[in-house]
Amino acid sequence: MNQEIEQKMKVLSRNLMNLSEEQYQNQRAIQIQEQAEADFQELKIRSHRFFHRILETWHGDKELFRFFTNIQLDTQQIERSLSYKLEEQKEILIQEKQKMRFLHFSLRIGIEYRYLILSKKHTIIRFKSIQLDM
C-alpha cells in the first residue's frame, strides 16, 4: 500500500514538474506577446504620423490625396485585423495560464493530501506497534 502511494506521489511530482515547465513556457509566450503588442502600437503611431505628413503635403493634388487616403484606409483595416488577432492570442494565453494555475494548485493539494495520508499511516502503524508492546 505504501509503495502504491509513493508511486502515485512520484507520478504527481513528475506531473508537477512538467506543469511548472509548461507554466514557464506560457509566461515566456505572454512576455513575447506583450512585446509584440508594444511593437505593434509603435508601428501604428508611426503609420499615423506618416500618413498625416503625406496627406498634409499632397492635399493640393486631389488624385494623389485620394490615392494616399485609400492606402491609409487599407492600412487601418489591416491594423484592426492584427489588433483583434493579438487580443485573441493574448486571451488564449491568459486562459491557459489560469488553467495551469488551477492544475498546479490541484496537483499540490493532491501531493500534500497523499503525503498527509502516508504520514498518518506511519503514525498509526507506530502507535499500534507501541500499544502492542505494552
Image (tube, helix red, strand yellow):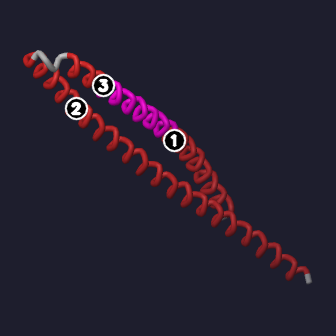
The one nearer the camera, 8 or 34, is: 34
Amino acid carrying label 1: it is Gln
* Mark closer to the observer (3, 1): 3
Which residues, given as a range, are shown in magenta? 28-48
Residue picked out by circle 3: 47
Q: Is residue 34 magenta?
A: yes
Q: Is the residue marked by circle 1 packed among few (<14), some (14-19), or many (20+) residues within 10 Å?
A: some
Q: Identify the residue at horizontal 28%, vertical 41% (top origin).
A: 84
The residue that disc 1 covers is 27
Q: Quadrant of the C terminus?
A: bottom right
What amino acid does circle 2 point to?
Answer: Gln
CB under 8 Å between callouts 2 and 1?
A: no
Q: Residues within 10 Å of mark 3 (few under 14, many from 20)?
A: some
Mark 3–mark 2 Cα distance, whole angstroms, equals 9 Å
Which amino acid does the dot numbered 3 rest on? Answer: Ser
* 97 lies left or right of 111: left
Q: CA distance from mark 2 to mark 1?
A: 30 Å
**Which residue occupies 46% across, 33% down?**
35
Q: Main secondary structure of the magenta part?
A: helix
**Which residue is disc 2 drawn over?**
76
**Which comes before the other along the chain, label 3 or label 2?**
3
Q: Earlier in the sequence, mark 3 or mark 1?
A: 1
Q: Between residues 109 and 32, which one lies in front from this camera angle?
A: 32
Q: Is residue 51 above or below residue 133?
A: above
Secondary structure of the residue carrying numbered label 1: helix
Name above or below for residue 40 compared with residue 105. above
